[in-house]
Amino acid sequence: MTDFKLQSDGPVTRITIDRLAKSNALSSDMMEEIAGIVRGIGGAPGEKALVIDAAGDRGFSAGADISELRAGREGLERQEEVILGLSEGIETCPALIVTVLHGYAKGGGTIFPCLSDIVIARADVYVSFPEIQFRMYPFLLHALLTRRIPHSLAWQLCATGRALGADEAFGLGLVTEVLPMEGFRERAEERVRHYLDIRASLALGLEFTANAASLPFAGQMKLAGGMIHRNFAAPGVDEAIKRHRARLASKARPS
């Protein structure tokens, strides 16, 4: 395991793509190994977290390693197999998944942000699907994109290969928040810690999102009412409310 770093700290697992000589391109072996790590993360929803980032300053990932296609159909089938396995592993992982993006995220490298719960991006990020320049339509990536955006827009991006800037990706919901370039690493770590701290509540929000989509409005409201009580009992909620009330009380005291 030389092309990514793995760090485990209690309930938090961090995977850092580190293949700078190849612009952080993802080899099939890398994707297979990462998929195995992700599948090994157990626990209840909100109990654990997975953070995915990348080394270097230029970019997050140039995508799946195109040099593997020199093996012809065999190389293509291998990439298809591991991309399907990695996507399934991320999709079914019970942990809160946070991806930190900088620079470029291209092609297969967008698997992570497309399937993450939280995506923190540097202001210079651009997301693109350049496979069409090789006359290859990125079918798997189109399917991944539709987890976040309509088919018509996924078609536009995959058919043209045009890049999405950070602000547009934010507007479409592919990115959760955009941070300035200056001091990005430090600010991103602060935001990661924040999301990890509230992961139990976010897990309930994700559960509501998944279950409410197929319900009529009245059903959504009924579901929401029940989940409020579950959220109130989540770790840290009572303490956070007490701290907030103490802050309000201190501001109300005459100086």
Image (cartoon, grey):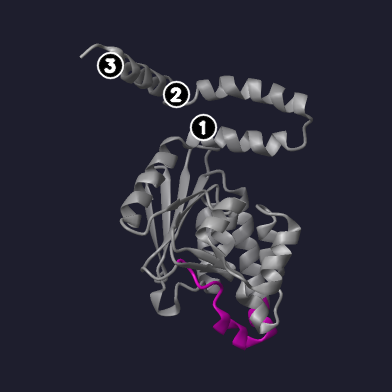
Residue occupied by mark 1: 201
Residue occupied by mark 3: 250
Q: Earlier in the sequence, mark 1 or mark 3?
A: 1
- Indicate the quadrant containing the C terminus: top left, top right, bottom left or bottom right: top left
Q: CA distance from mark 1 to mark 2?
A: 9 Å
Q: Amino acid at mark 3?
A: Ser
Mark 1 crowdedness (10 Å alpha carbons): few <14, some 14-19, many ≥20: many
Q: Earlier in the sequence, mark 3 or mark 2?
A: 2
Q: Amino acid at mark 2?
A: Val
- Which of labels 3 and 2 is toward the front? 3
Q: Is residue 106 left or right of residue 24?
A: right
Asked whether residue 137 is drawn in magenta, I would say no
Residue occupied by mark 2: 237
Q: Position of residue 54 (x, y in %)?
A: 41, 63
Mark 2 crowdedness (10 Å alpha carbons): few <14, some 14-19, many ≥20: some
Q: Position of residue 4 (x, y in %)?
A: 42, 66
Residue at image point 41% right, 36% down: 197
